[in-house]
Image (cartoon, coloured by chain):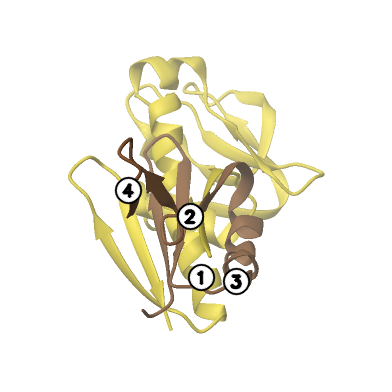
Chain colours: A brown, B yellow
Amino acid sequence: MSEEIVLEFWEDGQVNLEGKGFKGKACFKEMQFLKDALGVETSFTKKQEFYQTEVKRDGKVKAK
Amino acid sequence: MSHYSEVVIELTDEGCLVAALSRLGFKGKVEVHRVAQPLYGYQGDMRGQKAHIIIRREHVGRAANDLGFERQADGKYRGWVSEYDQKYNKYDDAWMGKLKQAYGVEKARAEAKKKGYRVSEQKLNDGRVRLVLRR
């Protein structure tokens, strides 16, 4: 998967940034220049869907 | 690992602020001053506020006052919009939000190009603007 950064600018002056396809901490480093340039970071969420697992009641494990 | 961030936009870049005002319809109507200049009211009366970036009242609307942005000591711009223009010419919080949106788009495009990214822009139906940066 190629690396890309997606920014969505809302009409109230907020912006959401999402890094896609980065490995390890490269995402933090690569997006920092945008955060520094735009303003104040108000929330931060790691995306873990690639290595999360869901345990079902019957004991089976299903990868998301 | 990838991540999400949410950022509240602050106005700090003169060129991007001028470009954002152009996006909102003030292309060629924006004054930029090294030293802050006085703002004037709808009757030509000098107001107590000064600004580095100014849109004169004739471009703002009917019976309008000058609209300005003053650079503060911390580098952030403070907007000066009269109560009248907020109420009757719709330069209200919603307009300021759209200005920040346009500013953010301009600032992100400029910074991304410095880093060698290719940038694509898309206006969404709900008013959001999406930028995708790739390299």
C-beta proximity under 8 Å, tags 2 and 4 = no
What separation in Å lies between label 3 and label 2 (alpha carbons)? 12 Å
- Observer-nearest residue: B35 or B72? B72
Q: Is label 1 in a helix, a strand or a loop? A: helix
- Observer-nearest residue: B59 or A47? A47
Q: Residue at x 63, y 66 (%)?
A: A33
Q: Amino acid at mark 4?
A: Lys
| Residue at mark 3: chain | A
First in sequence: mark 3 vs mark 4: 3
Q: Residue at x 34, y 23 (%)?
A: B89
Residue that carries the numbered disc 1 in the rendered image: B110
Q: Are marks 2 and 4 on the same chain?
A: yes
Estimate the x, y position of residue B16 in percent, counting from the top left: 52, 59
Mark 1 vs mark 3: in front? 3
C-beta proximity under 8 Å, tags 3 and 4 = no
What separation in Å lies between label 2 and label 4 (alpha carbons)? 20 Å
Q: Residues within 10 Å of mark 2 (few under 14, many from 20)?
A: few
Q: Is residue B91 visible?
A: no
Q: Is label 4 in a helix, a strand or a loop? A: loop
The numbered dot on residue A60 is 4
Q: Amino acid at mark 1?
A: Ala
Q: Is label 3 in a helix, a strand or a loop? A: loop
Residue that carries the numbered disc 3 in the rendered image: A24
Q: Residue at x 36, y 79 (%)?
A: A1
